[in-house]
Amino acid sequence: MHVVAKHTRVNALRPVHGRGEGVRAWLVWQLPHWLIAFIGIVVLADAAVLAAAASRLTIHRHDLWLFGCLLVCSAATVELTRHVVANGGSVKDMHATWELPAALLLPLAYAPVLPLIRLALTQWRIRRVAPYQRVFTACATGLSYIAAALVFHALLRVVHGTVSAPGSRALAWMSLAAVCAAAQWIVYQALIVTLLKGSDPAVRLRDEHFARDSLYSDLNERCVAVLVTFCAAFSWIALLFAAPCINLLQRSLRHNRLLNDSRIDAKTGLNNAATWEYHASTEVARAVRTRTPLAIALLDIDRFKVINDTHGHLVGDQVLREIAHLVTSQLREYDAAGRWGGEEFSLLLPHTRAVDAIRIAERIRSNIAALRIIVPGATGGERVHVTVSLGVAALDSGTERKLSELMAAADAALYRAKSCGRDQVQMISTTRGLSAVSSASGGINATVDGQARDRQARDGQVSAAPDVFRRALTS
């Protein structure tokens, strides 16, 4: 979710390592004033509701016992997460399975407390980040469970008898719990999305935050939470039997997450070479079968070794992430970008004619050339100018080519762009013998390759083909 950009505001949400940094060094102060006010309102609202509910709280032994059991289960989940992260893995948390019962079965004052303790344990046991990040997440989570609790108790007044006899009215009781679980998810997502979009309006939430797998995992988590809540309404003993089942579910979700992570390049967040090649092979076969156009592009960062040698590999990694973010923002939803290797990226452009492919590539090249990446330094930072070269290969509609042929053509075009001065786009059509070049100084020009010119000369078409192609490119 986090992408290093030209001092973009999303950096304010990134982890801050090191214990010596004071409050003034927190990147949260770089956010817009209205967003800082929004964070403050969320924190104050959660604290105000907690204080008001605690002032009217009557402590019962059963409530403390149930809260203690839920707290132990939540702490055990945090500890399991710590072991997974320590081993270099990733895990989907299942904390809602313990926090929803606390919100629905206990007095209102308990609802925001469990997330607060859980995130304090996460800060202590798993990973340290800037305290304001944990505080906001805890308060947003607490407000979401407060909303769920208020909805639940309001609906109980409408559906009589569910409190005293949840077993006899199981359908109604669990339906109410499901509605409250959905309300909790909606409130939490609304608060988090407001923060993310406010800090970086260009962030693509659909790709990660609202991806199908993520939504499916959230649905599973809420369904299990409703089931645990219903069982805990009868006896806390049910939690002892629920904990191993939830541990098993968490492991299965971790397997899916690891599978997804294996398809992604860790530094850029793009598809890795194997995943992109598989997807590209499928799309090329479909384009040949349906007789539709398609294009492939290879992007290479100019003089990337000089950047690494001059500014260090951390800056080189920042350049990779920045370019990956910019390329993704310039592509359409059905396009695919991947990191092909080193400083080279690969682009898949389905339903794209040669003329449109070179326009897309030129737009990417010009935007990257206008990019200025700031390297932190004692004098306020140094700007690093980055340029790229692109090679494009087009598959015309109604022709038959394999991915390997398109990649070879794109690689040849990229080599030509490098040898002709860099910071430009070269394009080769694998069927018509047409080539085009686009650069910052020369605009877009089209030519006919030597063998294709000889073949077209025999057919009397040598003057028509490049003229038509040039008109299409410049129109």
Image (spheres, rainbow, N blue to C red):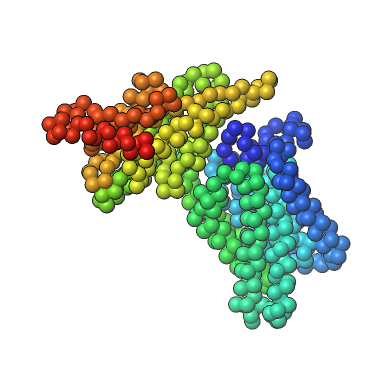
Given the current orientation, which residue lies at the most extreme left position? 458
The residue positioned 84% from the left and 61% from the top of the image is 52
The correct choice, above or below, for 212 with respect to 275 in the image is below
Instruction: Using the image as rendered, state which of residue 235 and residue 370 is in the foreground.
Output: 370
* Number of numbered discs on residues: 0
Determine the residue positioned at 52% across, 58% down. Answer: 216
373 over 31 or under it: above or below: above
Left or right, residue 84 beside residue 155: left
- Image position, residue 126 (x, y; %): 65, 42
Query: Which of these two is toward me, 246 or 185?
Result: 185
Confirm whether residue 459 shows in the render: yes
Direction right: furthest residue: 55
Q: Left of 81 or right of it: where is 474?
A: left
Q: Is residue 137 left or right of residue 360?
A: right
Q: Quadrant of residue 426?
A: top left
| Picture residue at 73% right of the left edge, 67% below the top | 150
Q: Is residue 90 above or below residue 297?
A: below
In front here: 443 or 327?
443
Instruction: Tell me where residue 468 sits by quadrant.
Output: top left
Q: Is residue 163 visible from the viewing direction of this image?
A: no
Q: Is residue 23 left or right of residue 362?
A: right
* Quarter that holds the N terminus: top right
Which x, y percent locates residue 208? 53, 49
Which of the 4 image quarters holds residue 421? top left
Residue 459 vs residue 183, the one in the foreground = 459
Residue 204 image offset from top left, x and y in percent: 54, 47
Residue 56, image x, y percentages: 86, 65
- Residue positioned 53% across, 33% down in the render: 322
Assign the C terminus to one quadrant of the image: top left
